[in-house]
Image (cartoon, rainbow, N blue to C red):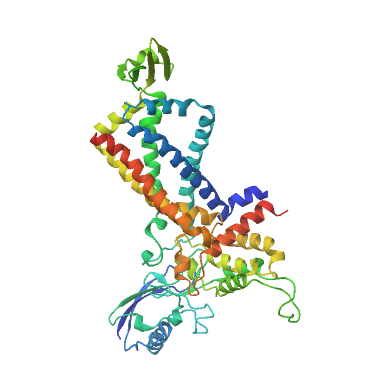
Amino acid sequence: MNLTLKVWRQKNTNDKGKFETYKAENISPDMSFLEMFDVVNERLIVEGKEPIAFDHDCREGICGSCSMYINGRPHGPNNGVTTCQLHMRSFKDGDIIVVEPWRSAAFPVIKDLAVDRSSFDRIQAAGGFVSVNTGNAQDANNLPIPKNDADESFAAAACIGCGACVAACKNSSAMLFVGAKVTQFALLPQGKPEATQRVLAMVNQMDAEGFGSCTNTGACSAECPKEISLSVIARMNREYLSAQLFAE
Amino acid sequence: MNWFTKMFNSSIGQKLIMALTGLFLCSFLIIHMVGNLQLFKADSGLAFNKYAVFMTTNPLIKTVSYLLYFSILFHAFKGIWLVFSNKKARPVQYAMVDGKANSHWTSRNMGLLGTIILVFVVVHMSNFWYEYKFGHVPYTRYTENLMTGIVDVEEMDEKYFQQEKLKEEVYLGERTIIVKDLYKEVSLEFKEEWWLVALYVLSMAAVSFHLVHGFKSAFQTLGINHRKYNGLIHFIGVWFFGIIIPIGFAAMPLYFMFK
């Protein structure tokens, strides 16, 4: 396959940045999108040019590192996948592909397509944990948990913190991410004692980081590689409002 | 900051304001619709005119109507403010956005639809609300023969009735009602101004799209997302607020235009 890439190049956070056009030639349709970028970068290095910076780590869809806003959608045209799970067979020979970094005030560009997602870490550090060490594993039936709660909590815990929700949202809202983190703990007995402080602290931090508010377009959930449901946002709203209204 | 202001200043609290005022405005639409259906009654507007007097003189209704004006303004200006503050969360825009791949057009354009509705509300209120309260609206005398039930309608000169909106008396087998004739005002406006009818119909389309998303979105904001009830909320949002209500309202100017 031969493709034309229009890639956002930005030297550092303060640089204005601009699109550059690159040719990606002799690309196998079985390559992942990141492998295609590796091929382009190798050629750039041989030519003595600066390779394109992009985030990647596990390359199997579980670390949440790879980002890239491809042809107007986070992680490209397919649903429920990260960029490393996107293969070139999803494109046609001769396609022009526009690649941009996640764009959000809370995700400043570090270089080219790599953005600083430490705002997510700070939200997580504000309350996304259980304070007390749990000690040794208990007997399996010590804490009965309804199957539905366990399933829903597990589905929320599948969030890999990639930031596609923020990238997809027209308001750069982080509510799907925060909602998933809140939901994951709120449904389990281990998370309940700190549920009130947790939701207040995480939402406060989310607002302080400069994310927008939610219009319930559902774009976040549609673009989430882990297909996290919009219902986690409703749960977060419920937890937050009842914490504000009723917690003493 | 105390908890109350903190709550309403948070991103979730701001949306809570939009949801609560929005749902209140939805409830108003039902009342407004039911009342205005009297426009279709073939009684030369008597029922509608009496209803207009009731709505503008009853102290409870008057109190709620001030709450309504406040809610309209609050919902509109908070909405505009939110659109701009949300824009700040993405200072550099994407060069390419494939919005339709992940969301509905209506949900992405609530600000635009809301602005159309706000312009409509201003025109609508200056046409009828302002005219009725402060402008010149003709008076009509309905004389009903209590034996035969035949109603005689006669236009009055308004200068005789500056103070009272409604005067009713029964004398010698005849009930005479003299009332400020908002019905005539409505029918003349829509008969004569085709562009006004077009604006009303277009605005009702905006109301439809705004509520198809807005109604269910309000419940989501309030944290009401439940497998048992989501279907019902969606159904009411689409069929009642998105289709029946806007069609009902749009039918009113069209009815007078073609009458």
- In the displayed structure, B87 sits above or below A228; it is above
The answer to whether residue A90 shows anywhere in this view is yes
Residue at 51% across, 30% down: B62
Residue drawn at 53 percent across, 63 percent down: A231
Residue B72 horizontal/vertical position (percent): 47, 41
- Spot occupied by residue B171 in the image (x, y as percentages of width and height): 40, 10
Q: Is residue B210 visible?
A: no
Residue B243 location, x and y as percent?
37, 49
State the residue lying farthest toward the top: B172
Residue farthest along the front direction in this orientation:
B147
Q: Quadrant of residue A28?
A: bottom left
The N terminus of chain A, quarter of image: bottom left
Q: Quadrant of residue B63?
A: top right
**Position of residue A194 in the picture relative to residue A228 (left or right):** right
| Count of marks, rendered view | 0
**Above or below, comparing residue B230 to residue B256 in the picture:** below
Residue at point 55%, 65% (across, down): A232
Determine the image quadrant of residue A180. bottom right
Q: Is residue B205 above or below residue A25?
A: above
Q: Nearer the viewer, residue B199 or A122?
A: B199
* Left or right for A237, reference B248: right
| Horizontal and vertical percent position of residue B176 | 38, 15
